[in-house]
């Protein structure tokens, strides 16, 4: 199949060509009418063409690749003022008020994108995102498993996370070497009332950075020594639920 553009591996350009899969991903959005929607990495417009057809959606995209931005504007004239040509990691929040995010994300920057979502969280209603399958599983995973990690705790502290479905390699051009999965994140409006997100993130990162150690060892530099006598610190990070992390944060990082 010949394409009017090049495909850049360095930018994670694996474009969806399976139209049923494109429609399936788009149909996961809970709300469309009256919704502001950001697509991250529209690329060749695989899902974009369906998104801009949704009635009542105020659409914008952020795409880093000039060639794709020009292609999209030429192919879909309605996108003329709707594509921000920028690195998502350096972009300002694209809307005032609430918005949702959708995308087949560049896998090499999955974690930084999720941290960006966390940063924008007060304004983010819902995310429908495709990731490398292991990352998608990690975000959705509950405590007590090896897969459970920093991204599980942090995203689940602010969002309900649901693993939706796998996406087969053959749905893409070129097919990626890794498996893919789509997840939904729904904002739960900070149910744990975490006021100092920065400190909470530091705590969770420190706990998992030495995940084989007890929390007592892992958190030596993070929490005051007198705090570490509690028997919860005999456990390892992967044994603590989101609520457990929140309670440590509130108790010891006031
Ligand atoms: N949504 C399209 C393309 C997915 S590939 C599809 O499903 O077919 C990932 C896309 O993200 C590419 O278009 C790539 O150029 C873009 N991208 C990569 N790094 C980016 C970054 N830092 N900021 C914004 N877009 C980026």
Image (cartoon, rainbow, N blue to C red):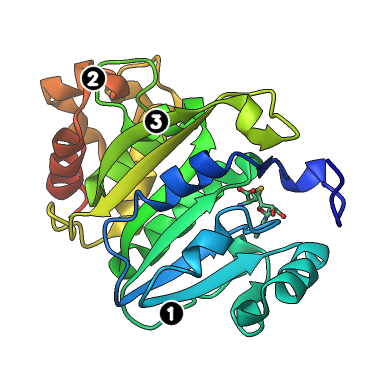
CB atoms at circles 1 and 3 under 8 Å apart? no
Spatial separation of the CA atoms under disc 3 and disc 2: 26 Å
Up the image or down, 167 lies above or below 24; here it is above
Name the residue that disc number 1 marks: 95
User: Toward the viewer: 243 or 1?
Assistant: 1
Q: Earlier in the sequence, mark 1 or mark 3?
A: 1
User: Toward the viewer: 114 or 185?
Assistant: 185
| 113 sits to left or right of 99 | right
For image coordinates 23% across by 19% down, the residue present is 239
Q: Position of residue 72 (x, y in %)?
A: 71, 68
At mark 1, the secondary structure is: loop
Q: Earlier in the sequence, mark 2 or mark 1?
A: 1
Quarter of the image for the C terminus: give it: bottom left
Up the image or down, 16 lies above or below 237; here it is below
Q: Earlier in the sequence, mark 3 or mark 2?
A: 3
For image coordinates 79% across by 72% down, the residue present is 70
Spatial separation of the CA atoms under disc 1 and disc 3: 29 Å
At mark 2, the secondary structure is: helix
Spatial separation of the CA atoms under disc 2 and disc 1: 38 Å
């Amino acid at each position: 199949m010949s394409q009017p553009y090049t495909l850049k591996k360095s930018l994670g350009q694996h474009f969806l060509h399976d139209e049923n899969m494109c429609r399936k991903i788009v149909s996961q959005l809970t709300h469309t009418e009256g919704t502001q929607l950001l697509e991250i990495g529209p690329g060749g417009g695989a899902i974009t063409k369906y998104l801009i057809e949704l009635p009542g959606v105020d659409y914008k995209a952020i795409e880093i690749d000039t060639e794709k931005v020009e292609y999209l504007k030429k192919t879909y004239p309605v996108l003329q003022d709707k594509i921000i040509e920028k690195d998502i990691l350096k972009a300002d929040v694209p809307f005032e008020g609430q918005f949702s995010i959708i995308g087949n994300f560049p896998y090499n920057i999955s974690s930084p994108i999720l941290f960006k979502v966390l940063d924008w969280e007060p304004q983010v209603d819902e995310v429908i995102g495709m990731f490398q399958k292991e990352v998608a599983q990690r975000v959705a995973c509950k405590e007590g498993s090896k897969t459970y990690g920093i991204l599980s705790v942090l995203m689940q502290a602010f969002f309900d996370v649901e693993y939706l479905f796998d996406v087969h390699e053959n749905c893409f051009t070129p097919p990626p070497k890794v498996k893919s999965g789509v997840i939904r994140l729904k904002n739960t409006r900070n149910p744990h009332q975490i006021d100092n997100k920065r400190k909470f993130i530091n705590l969770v990162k420190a706990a998992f950075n030495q995940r084989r150690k007890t929390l007592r060892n892992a958190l030596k530099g993070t929490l005051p020594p007198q705090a570490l006598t509690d028997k919860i610190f005999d456990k390892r990070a992967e044994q603590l639920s989101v609520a457990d992390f929140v309670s440590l944060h509130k108790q010891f990082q006031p």
